[in-house]
């Protein structure tokens, strides 16, 4: 028998680790894969309620999937270094497989689990699954990891992409049962997520993918920056938790490309979507080679950046009460849906770091707790890009103007008024002009909506001074 340890691969289909276990067990004395999930309190300590709610829903679906095939998902709680050798002993298993995770913390945990299994003479195999090209597979000609996305992306697109892996059949799974119900959020010590967490099943992921590839993907290139358009895939939480495999996503997008003329705008649009999948892989390799970026700036400045300490401004940002409509809409979308559109993530991250002059780590920490799709590599990459401290970062002197960003990407204020009810019915021009309206005008137009907490023009100058000081120029 083989144990397959599920972690961020909560699906049966297109799962490289599970396929490897199913193939290997065919030659075992007693064939069959025993699937297991371990609730590890140390890992959960880093999560927020929306993410854990999504994970529990995904586990529920995975369990159903196994039960439909005459098997079951064993659920245990504790330290995987102790739990996995114990499960392996319980089933007299010949080996344990799992899918690789490339963050520093996961790598440390996996090394410890490996050692514990080796001490018990259990074979262990960690399998590359979550991304197409493992860190180290795409490098510069000198063999170094890329620091600039464009070059990485070119090679990423040129490489062959494997097809999805077959799901194991019922015959390949062990006839096991686990009557213990899954724990609830409260059992795990989490509050209610207070957000509309999306359905987490692989079926929901597949429906989302198919719906996206039947239409929005062809508008993606042109409209993906417009948050009211809803033409992005919304697959991020599924990709984070592995309720869909990357090969399946790619294959479906290739099929969508095949439907339209080669070189057409629609085909280009599909490629642009695929490029976002490459960003995900780029940031995974950044994190793999630089695990310290979780808490440290990737980019070294001459002097420490002199971030401000302003708890009130931070709270206004978290509450969506900054008086900058597009920023507030994004922060309120985050609370309501545990999700935020990519363009708006960039705007709110720029606002926190370049207008409020607060350390990106405050924003990263809030996103980590609130986002259903929080992914260490992508979240950190996004924050450090916006803060001008990352690889391939936005130059420190290029600072988003929240007013013009709102005007350009939400001209009719449709996105803004979806999340900021105080501004409903207000003329979009007045909404975008809000920070420059007089107090009397603001009271006439939307008395409930807050005044701007800072002056963008002044803060822009201060941000440039702050970075020039850090660079040693001032
Ligand atoms: P789509 O546009 O449909 O993209 C498809 C997939 O590609 C996404 O699901 C995601 O897996 C990947 N992707 C897209 N854009 C990026 C990107 N810039 N970097 C890396 N991968 C990308 N993405 C996360 O998955 N988790 C995070 O925690 C996260 N935090 C972010 C924080 C900040 C400050 C910023 C600026 C970006 C962050 N992103 C994060 C990237 C991006 O905003 C989200 O992936 C995207 O908004 C998810 O929506 P979607 O699935 O509809 O994306």
Image (cartoon, rainbow, N blue to C red):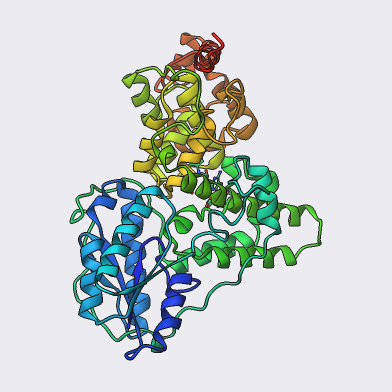
Image quarter of residue 391:
top right
What's the residue at 52%, 49% (across, down)?
285
Whole-percent x and y of residue 461? 55, 11
Instruction: Identify the residue shown where x is 63% and y is 43%.
Output: 149
For the question of whether residue 379 can be seen, the reply is: yes
99 with respect to 92 (left or right): right
Q: Is residue 457 left or right of residue 169?
A: right
Which quadrant, please, contains the C terminus? Answer: top right
- Residue 52 x %, y %: 31, 54
Q: Nearer the viewer, residue 352 or 154?
A: 154
Query: Residue 154, how many percent across, how many down?
Result: 70, 50
Q: Nearer the viewer, residue 405 or 19?
A: 19
Residue 86 sits in which quadrant? bottom left
Relative to 35, 207 lies left or right: right
> In the image, is residue 416 above or below residue 356?
below
Give percent across and percent down for residue 175: 29, 86
Q: Is residue 416 above or below residue 93?
A: above
**Quarter that holds the N terminus:** bottom left
- Of 155 and 363, the residue lying toward us: 155
Relative to the observer, which residue lies in front, 309 or 68? 309
């Amino acid at each position: 028998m083989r144990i397959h340890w599920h972690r961020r691969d909560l699906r049966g289909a297109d799962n490289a680790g599970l396929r490897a276990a199913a193939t290997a067990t065919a030659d075992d004395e007693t064939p069959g894969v025993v699937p297991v999930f371990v609730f590890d309190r140390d890992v959960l300590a880093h999560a927020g309620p929306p993410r854990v709610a999504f994970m529990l829903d995904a586990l529920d679906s995975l369990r159903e999937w196994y039960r439909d095939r005459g098997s079951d998902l064993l659920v245990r709680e504790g330290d995987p270094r102790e739990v996995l050798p114990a499960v392996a002993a319980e089933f007299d298993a010949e080996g344990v497989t799992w899918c690789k995770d490339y963050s520093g913390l996961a790598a440390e945990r996996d090394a410890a689990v490996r050692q514990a299994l080796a001490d018990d003479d259990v074979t262990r195999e960690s399998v590359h699954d979550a991304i197409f090209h493992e860190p180290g597979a795409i490098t510069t000609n000198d063999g170094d990891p890329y620091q600039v996305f464009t070059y990485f992306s070119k090679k990423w697109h040129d490489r062959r992409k494997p097809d999805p892996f077959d799901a194991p059949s019922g015959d390949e799974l062990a006839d096991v049962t686990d009557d213990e119900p899954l724990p609830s959020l409260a059992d795990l010590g989490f509050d209610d997520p207070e957000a509309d967490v999306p359905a987490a099943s692989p079926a929901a992921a597949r429906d989302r993918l198919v719906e996206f590839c039947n239409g929005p993907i062809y508008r993606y290139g042109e409209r993906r920056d417009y948050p009211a358009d809803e033409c992005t895939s919304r697959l991020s939480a599924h990709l984070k938790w592995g309720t869909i495999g990357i090969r399946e996503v790619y294959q479906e997008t290739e099929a969508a490309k095949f439907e339209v003329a080669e070189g057409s705008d629609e085909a280009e649009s599909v490629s642009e979507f695929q490029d976002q999948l490459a960003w995900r892989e780029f940031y995974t390799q950044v994190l793999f080679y630089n695990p310290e970026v979780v808490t440290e700036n990737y980019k070294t400045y001459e002097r420490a950046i002199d971030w401000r300490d302003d708890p009130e401004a931070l709270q206004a940002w978290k509450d969506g009460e900054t008086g900058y409509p597009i920023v507030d809409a994004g922060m309120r979308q985050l609370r309501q849906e545990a999700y935020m559109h990519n363009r708006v993530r960039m705007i709110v991250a720029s606002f926190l770091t370049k207008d409020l002059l607060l350390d990106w780590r405050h924003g990263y920490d809030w996103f980590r707790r609130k986002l259903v799709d929080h992914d260490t590599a992508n979240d950190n990459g996004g924050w450090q890009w916006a803060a001008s401290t990352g690889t391939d970062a936005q130059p420190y002197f290029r600072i988003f103007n929240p007013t013009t960003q709102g005007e350009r990407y939400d001209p009719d204020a449709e996105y803004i008024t979806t999340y900021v009810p105080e501004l409903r019915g207000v003329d979009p021009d007045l909404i975008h002009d809000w920070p420059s309206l007089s107090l009397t005008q603001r009271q006439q137009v939307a008395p409930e909506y807050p005044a701007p907490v800072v002056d963008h023009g002044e803060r822009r100058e201060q941000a440039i001074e702050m970075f020039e000081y850090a660079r040693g120029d001032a």
